[in-house]
Amino acid sequence: MPDLSTNCGGIKSPNPFWLASAPPANSGNQVQRAFDAGWGGAVWKTLGQPIQNVSSRFGATKIRGVAGVGFNNIELITDRALDVNFREIYETKKKFPNHAVIVSLMVETKAEWQDFIKRAVDTGADGLELNFGCPHGMCERGMGSAVGQEPRVNEQITSWAVEYSTIPVLVKLTPNVSDILPHGHAAKRGGAHGVSLINTIKSIISVDIDRLAIEPRVGGLSTNGGYCGAAVKPIALHMVAALARDKSFGLPISGIGGVSNWRDAVEFLLLGSSSVQVCTEVMLRGYRVVEDMRDGLEEYMRKHDFAKLDDMIGKAIPSFSEWGNLDLNYETVAKIDANKCIGCQLCIVACDDGAHQCIHPNADASIRVPVVDESECVGCNLCQIVCPVSDCISLEQVNNGFASATWNEHVHEGKALRPKKGAH
Amino acid sequence: MTDRIGEARSEAVFEDFKGQYTRDQATVEANRCLFCSDAPCVKVCPTHIEIPQFIRKIATDNVKGSARTIFEANILGMSCARVCPVEVLCVGACVYNAMGVPPVQIGKLQRYSTDVAYDAKWRFFEAGPDSGKRVALVGAGPASLACAHELRRHGHAVTIFEKRSAIGGLNATGVAPYKMKADRAAEEAAWVLGIGGVEVKTGVAVGTDVSFEQLEQQHDAVFFGAGLGSDTKLGVPGEDLPGVSGAVEWIEQMKLSRVPTDGVRHCLVVGGGNTAVDVVREACGLGIPRVTMLYRGTQAKMSGYAHEWKAALPEGGRADWQAVVTRFEGDGRVERVHCARLDAKKQPIAGSDFVVEADLVLVAIGQSKLGALLSGLEGIALESGCVVTDEHGCTGRKGWFAGGDCRNGGKEVVNAAAEGKAAALAIHAYLSGGSHA
Ligand SMILES: Cc1cc2nc3c(=O)[nH]c(=O)nc-3n(C[C@H](O)[C@H](O)[C@H](O)COP(=O)(O)OP(=O)(O)OC[C@H]3O[C@@H](n4cnc5c(N)ncnc54)[C@H](O)[C@@H]3O)c2cc1C
Ligand SMILES: Cc1cc2nc3c(=O)[nH]c(=O)nc-3n(C[C@H](O)[C@H](O)[C@H](O)COP(=O)(O)O)c2cc1C
Ligand code: SF4
């Protein structure tokens, strides 16, 4: 049986699935129910000087009838009394000694950081997470992403936290930066034991086109919120991978952003995360989603002969390279399995209007299966992406007789490139 | 008549009424599930399968996890996926019905996961450490199979006594072949018993070949899962003529070997329950040109499911409502059936007699109850022929448990599966010195 237990920056948990700091980790009752349901850890809803929230707070993107593909919020950190939070953290940790309980913090002054960290450590928690990521409300008060966007401030506060803390410190990074590396390195210089990312992305979720008003609506006004949920996963994966493949970085990573099922979690692990955090999918479907996450991960590990998580963490990193190292002579063309084709011809319209006009209707009008003109096909994948049938369109490698040649090799060594396709 | 599953069986001509999903079909359907909380579908399923979870796992292509979720609740999940009347159970409870949207096809999704699991030869459960206790199970139908499996998970040694040579009970010998054929039921029984440690003694009728007292002496507990008895008779003159048969008996012959249908011109089915409706569809499917169901009540009153009757119509089934058989006539075999019309109070209307020509008559008015087999055992109470137990399956006699049709009077496979499992847990508690003594 594969071992799902993990150690992320010195924080141990029976499995890599943690609740992200957000409403699902708002109280002792919730976190304890989540642990009962199978979650391995939880990052408590960020503690700081309690705030007052607005109503309403959330918005969601709906795409082709499915709501919540993307999600956004304009809520702030905890609005519950601090002593209640700290007491519940203590009680939760007592009841669940083997689960990871991490306290997320966001305060302003050095004295506040010292005070909050002492109280957090006193609860018996396993680690701290410094919230340098919230992109609304708190940043206007000089906290959250205002810290995460300034490497010097990030490093400074991290070093205070590490000094005051006797337990591991994770720094939660904001994606609202053009390059994540300087921010990860700032946390590292500050002495962090690991980083977690991503927090939410600055966003306007939607406009109520009849009221002519931005959503979520607070009376007549709204503000930018933080975007998260399934839609942000590609951005999160990119940022996680950027840090994971930077050899001079090397800190453990807790991956966050759009994890909805075990497959998403596997992707984060393969790109270097040693735990994953989930907020939106739990908000939309409940703690019970962890059952499939654990089940699916375990089965995946069995299938791939990974005995423990360490065997798979970061295993997809070597497949990343710069564009200049990709083989320009590697050639694929689309093949349509006539037995599987249902005749929707979505590939024809996609290729015609969005690619290289090389999928054509069959000359025999009674046959709906399209024909690929392989001499023109550039192997872009678009047809496969729009095809509703699994494994109907495949992209197969063509032997064009050209030896491998990257752009860098072409420029520096003069290696020959195959003739361009579809460029007339 | 044989009770082994033969090679050339009449039932072989039937195709699956609800076919198997491809992976694409299953994925599209699974993604429609709303993942309801406290889902109505789970509540109405007698085995309370975590339906939203198993469907979610299909959507994420975690089919093994999906199958595990199903079998964890119901080890007969493969046959239930095929034979359950989902229209009045899980699918009927889907909240989409309230939205006017077609309900999620839970049965077909369940069939997808369990079929994949069978094909892949996945096994999910292991026998528990040997408890040193021995339990006797009477009958090898769904109730006993579910009970045996659960008992093995707790390490108790199990011996099943089955009077037939085929195991699986009515799942093998009764359910309509367009839902499931006998060989598939046999495969299920073998898969369930694959947990090991279950001895099956076929061809042993308890009460005849071995006494109940003997069972009791040789075992630490006994589970009674003998189902129902033979077809109930009409009790009218001429019923013994060749060509008149009990429906369940005829179905068994169709499923295990062959029923003669060549030359049959009109089959009259007597009754209005689910066996009657099944046998109408079966007779039609075997090519009998005219099949009529004769029922004493109105269509609204029939106990057969409306959705099943609706499916029988396009297959050629016809009905004659509010009529009864008064006698059969024929020269060496049945040729004519004398009938009378009934009024709204089911009383014969004077002068309403009529004659129907029929060369095959299948009587589907119920099956006898087997509780009487236990009547000599002190402490075991019977009610209308059914064994009385508490909700865990405990009878009034120490160490005696019951479940399935013999307890509930004749419900579905899924009820038998639920009751067999519940009884196993009660037996385990009893054998562990717990509450259910
Ligand atoms: C024609 C017909 C069609 C049906 N169709 C469906 C359907 O589509 N879906 C559905 O869910 N349900 C259906 N049912 C109901 C379902 O088959 C039963 O509810 C279910 O099989 C009951 O399981 P059981 O284990 O209690 O009894 P059974 O399945 O009857 O099994 C009892 C077993 O005990 C054996 N036995 C009896 N007496 C003794 C003895 N003295 N010693 C040893 N062995 C003995 C019998 O031979 C039999 O194998 C149908 C029933 C019939 C009659
Ligand atoms: C309503 C809401 C409140 C959140 N509150 C916090 C917070 O207090 N502290 C924090 O670090 N992140 C907070 N987040 C961000 C999440 O922890 C997480 O980083 C982000 O939602 C991406 O993960 P997801 O795609 O799984 O939702 C919040 C997110 C949401 C939706
Ligand atoms: S099948 Fe229907 S009732 Fe059951 S969980 Fe899905 S949507 Fe809800």
Image (tube, coloured by chain):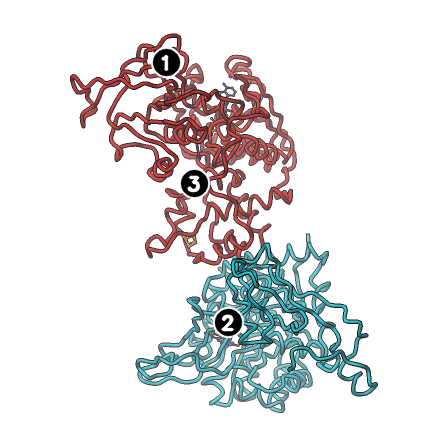
Chain colours: A cyan, B red
- Tag 3 secondary structure: loop
Q: Which picture quadrant has residue A13? A: bottom right
Q: Chain of mark 3?
A: B
Q: Which residue is mark 3?
A: B46
Q: Chain of mark 1?
A: B
Q: Can you say whether A6 is above or below B223 in the image? A: below
Q: Which residue is located at x 52 percent, y 67 percent? A: A346
Q: Which residue is mark 2?
A: A229
Q: Which residue is located at x 50 percent, y 14 percent? A: B207
Foreground of the two, B285 or A264:
B285
Q: Can you say whether A173 is above or below B89 in the image? A: below
Q: Position of residue B367 (x, y in %)?
A: 39, 22
Q: Which residue is located at x 57 percent, y 66 percent? A: A18
Circle 3 residues within 10 Å: few <14, some 14–19, many ≥20? some
- Tag 2 secondary structure: loop
Q: Position of residue B50 (x, y in %)?
A: 48, 49
Residue A70 numbered tag: none
N-terminal of the two: label 1 or label 3?
Answer: 3
Q: Residue furthest right?
A: A413
Q: Which residue is mark 1?
A: B334
- Residue A124 in view (yes/no): no
Inspect the image, locate mark 2, and give the three-letter code of the amino acid beneath it: Gly
Name the side, left or right, on which B405 lies relative to B295. right
- Tag 1 secondary structure: loop
Q: CA distance from mark 2 to mark 3?
A: 36 Å
Q: Can you say whether B44 is above or below A312 in the image? A: above
Dot in front, 1 or 3: 1
Q: Residue furthest front?
A: A364
Name the side, left or right, on which B318 lies relative to B426. left
Inspect the image, locate mark 3, and give the three-letter code of the amino acid beneath it: Pro
Circle 2 residues within 10 Å: few <14, some 14–19, many ≥20? many
